[in-house]
Amino acid sequence: KSDFNFLANVTVDTLRYDSTFMGELNIYAIDDPENPAIATILELAGPENDLLVEGGFNTETHSLDYEVDIVAMQMKLLDPFLSEIIKDSEGIFSGVASISGSTAKPVVQGGLNLKDVSTTLPFNNTRYTIEDHQIAFDDTTIDLGEMEVLDKRNNRAILSGQVYHNAMDEIRLDVEMQTDEFNFLNTSAEDNPVFFGKLVLAANATIKGPTDLLDINVTASTLDSSTITIS
């Protein structure tokens, strides 16, 4: 009997996502001849990305046991996985996570550190920036904590609550926002021909429900820079 049955040592020296250079990817995997397990090490190193994944996969039970250390990753790499709630993201995030469970039902737990990141929310076409914040997550919930958010004019709002999901699908929001002045809407007739414009409010708001049928309740006063068209 051989000492091992499977060995992989792969290097991709130029890994790109779309037109973005991510870095050099190295994957090392070896199975254990005494156990139905494949040990894996994945490393990604580039100018703005630094990632290490270590752990194993059981070939009989299909169970997962991985630890993820994100030293730095570009925020834009999250866009395709969270396309219902963010787009055109910029900035860097870091964090740690564990992946357990099985391939049929993975369990992901960990946290992300956001540093000078910005993104646009598709449902109101408004761009926001987060200077420094930590987010906790597991396989069903993203916990926002109390997050300070800036709009494009550096007005501040406090956003708190949770985002619920089913493997990053069937996304539902349950969040609250408080602000003295903030841009809540920046849409055109192309986005919504019935209701569009720029809406700047001093407000307390709750946003609940699935992203395609949001229930938004606002106690607010409209500020002078608002322009809304209803047709």
Image: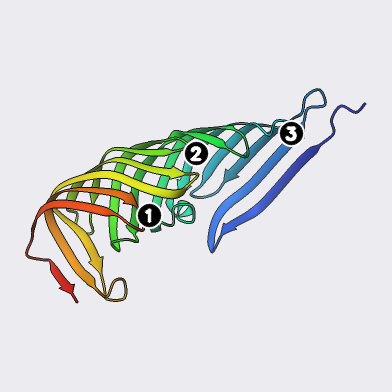
Residue 146, position as x, y percentages in the image: 25, 37
Residues marked 1 and 2 touching at CB (< 8 Å): no
Q: Which residue is mark 2?
A: 70
Residue 23 rendering spot, x and y as whole percentages: 58, 51
Write down the quadrant of residue 30 in the picture. Answer: top right
* Image-quadrant location for residue 32: top right
> Which residue in the structure is indicated by mark 3?
59
Observer-nearest of 6 and 177: 177
Quadrant location, the C terminus: bottom left
Q: How is the image coloured?
A: rainbow
Residue reaching furthest right? 1
What's the CA distance linking mark 2 and mark 3? 26 Å
Relative horizontal placement of residue 202, taking residue 84 as reference (left or right): left
**The residue positioned farthest toward the top in the image shown:** 34
Amino acid at the residue labelled 2: Ile
Give the SS element for disc 1. Answer: loop
Secondary structure beneath dot 2 equals: strand
Q: Nearer the viewer, residue 49 or 134?
A: 134
> Measured along the vertical axis of the image, is residue 6 above or below residue 149?
above
- Asked which quadrant contains residue 134, the reply is top left
Q: Are marks 2 and 3 in contact (CB under 8 Å)?
A: no
Identify which residue, 37 or 77, lies in the foreground: 37
Crowding around mark 2 (Cα neighbors within 10 Å: few <14, some 14 to 19, many 20+) is many
Residue drawn at (22%, 70%), measured in percent from left and top? 195
Residue type, label 3: Thr
Which residue: 56% across, 37% down? Answer: 106
Left of 52 or right of it: where is 162? left
- Tell me the CA gap for discs 1 and 3: 35 Å
Q: Could you tell which of marks 1 and 3 lies nearer the N-terminus?
A: 3
Q: Which residue is mark 1?
A: 85
Which numbered circle lies on residue 49?
Answer: none
* Closer mark to the observer between disc 1 and disc 2: 1
